[in-house]
């Protein structure tokens, strides 16, 4: 009898499903509304000049907050983006951001867009402008030479 009393809780855990547990598949992410950036934000110039120190600081922040989706090299193929099946811009391609102002990039980095959460109050304004400079720097790097075939 003692053995039965000891095993009963284990048997119940295995045979009784958890409260509220279902076999339903998780809901796919809902499409997000197109982001509307205020005109004054679009026209805002970047007051932070790109410097080696500023780019190094932005690279560190980018590594913590952005690379998981946008990729360490800005290619848009970070682990989380791949897992979520997201198609992101390749910042290494100069044409990817050519129609966006620094003000638009700042606004998106600060406030987020779609499934991307923004920096909000986690970063100070100059740091976000530094991230704009860093994102732009991906397109200025020369691509690696392809081996001759």
Image: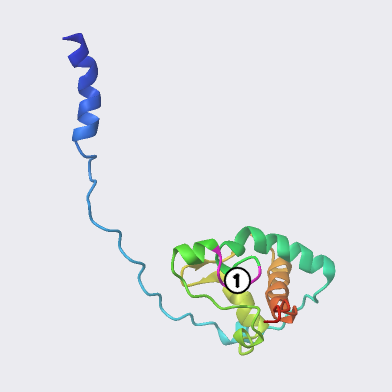
Label 1 residue SS: helix
Does 2 appear above or below 116?
above
| Magenta highlight on residue 61 | no
Q: Position of residue 21 (x, y in %)?
A: 24, 46
Query: Magenta part mainly helix, strand or loop?
Result: loop
Q: Which residue matches tag 1? A: 109
In the rendered image, the quadrant that contains the C terminus is: bottom right
Tell me the magenta residue range.
73-78
Q: Position of residue 112 (x, y in %)?
A: 53, 70
The answer to which of 122 and 98 lies nearer the viewer is 98
Identify whether 106 is placed above or below 81.
below
- Using the rendered view, name the quadrant where residue 6 is placed: top left
Residue at coordinates 50% horizontally, 66% vertically from top-left? 81
Q: Determine the image quadrant of residue 41.
A: bottom right
Q: Is residue 48 left or right of residue 81?
A: right
Task: Locate residue 102, reporting x and y percent.
Answer: 67, 82
In this rendering, does residue 30 appear at all? Answer: yes
């Amino acid at each position: 009898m003692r053995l039965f009393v000891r095993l009963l809780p284990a048997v119940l855990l295995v045979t009784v499903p958890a409260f509220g547990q279902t076999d339903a598949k998780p809901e796919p992410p809902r499409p997000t509304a197109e982001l509307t950036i205020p005109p004054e934000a679009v026209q805002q110039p970047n007051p932070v000049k790109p410097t080696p120190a500023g780019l190094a600081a932005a690279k560190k922040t980018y590594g913590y907050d952005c690379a998981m989706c946008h990729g360490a090299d800005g290619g848009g193929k970070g682990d989380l983006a791949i897992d979520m099946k997201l198609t992101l811009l390749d910042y290494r391609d100069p044409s990817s951001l050519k129609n966006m102002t620094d003000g638009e990039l700042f606004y998106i980095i600060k406030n987020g867009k779609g499934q991307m959460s923004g920096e909000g109050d986690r970063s100070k304004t100059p740091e976000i402008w530094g991230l704009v400079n860093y994102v732009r720097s991906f397109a200025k790097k020369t691509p690696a030479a392809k081996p001759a075939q």
